[in-house]
Image: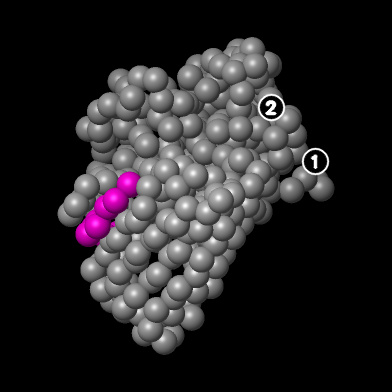
Amino acid sequence: MAYDRTVFLPIDPDSAFDLVTQPERLRRWCAISARVDLRLGGEFCWTITPRNYAIGNFTEIEPGKHVSFTFGWVNDPNLQPGASKITITLEPHEEGTNLRLVHEGLTEHQEVEHAEGWNYFLDRLAQFVTTSKATADPWNASPDNLNELKSADVALALAQVTLCNVNSSDLLKSTPCPEFNLGQLIDHQYGSIVNIAKSLGIPATGEADASCEVRLADLSQKIIETFSKRGLDGMLILGTNELPAKIVANILNIELLIHSIDIAKATGQNYEVSPAVADYVLGLSRQTISPEGRAAGLFGPEISAADSAGNTERLLAFTGRKS
């Protein structure tokens, strides 16, 4: 069985090719994070939804015309890596490009499942091309069976959408963190992610001229992948402190989620955190934020939340922010 659909995109074929091969572009419509080695035999890894990884290898590449690659899911015995093949063909149209996606090597049941996913994501692709506006993906908002890394994927998804909608004219705006304007807060958030990466032995080797969203997304993906491989046992050196790896993963969640809400508020962006995720990160925050940390100025004093406050408001109050 094969899935086969064509969508029209009002852009040229080269731009369409970037949308299906470049990590920054893929994150706009189908992936929380994306690692891509775009060469024959090169591997890609897309985080499609929290903790759900699609991987494969490129078998044909003709920029601006078509790309083929193997496709499978990590930890899915029913569609393992290499078990299926995707071909994306780009045909010029007088007003843009017809993009055809064919997914072969599926059983009848798999074709039905993947058709639902591909239809959803191709619709998001067409919407992004039409509006040029990055939007949050509802499929990433509230996964079941939350853990530290699944929650980090949710937080990263919000961080990317928030950062890519920041304009240079926004950088001097005030933020919920009174000690930082927006530009300083973005630098602080990235600096915290760099320190977490260093604790795991990951160098911050991103392009110096990359956008703040690209730098944060690329490094955060490496952190989450590394945690996935090593687990959350043992201790790590974060700055000058030796901490349990689980606490470092908690800090990753807090830095990504809380500061992304700060950035959204500073720029007037809408943000939505599911009650389950907000409650989960509040639990991580209670494990992590100590009186000593508050005394050192790492977090403001806890603010009393109203009895009627929702989970996100309670999370913000615990981290010293007014809703």
Percent x, y for residue 54?
35, 61
Residue found 35% across the figure and 31% down from its top: 196
Q: Secondary structure at mark 1?
A: loop
Q: Secondary structure at mark 2?
A: helix
252 or 95: which is nearer to us? 95
- Numbered disc in front, either 1 or 2: 2
Q: Is residue 189 magenta?
A: no
Q: Mark 1 highlights which residue?
A: 306
Percent x, y for residue 287?
48, 41
Disc number for residue 267: 2
- Mark 1: give few (<14), some (14-19) or many (20+) Cα within 10 Å: few
Q: Main secondary structure of the magenta part?
A: strand
Q: Residue furthest bottom?
A: 108
126 or 276: which is nearer to us? 126
Residue found 56% across the figure and 58% down from its top: 8
- At label 2, which amino acid type do we have? Thr
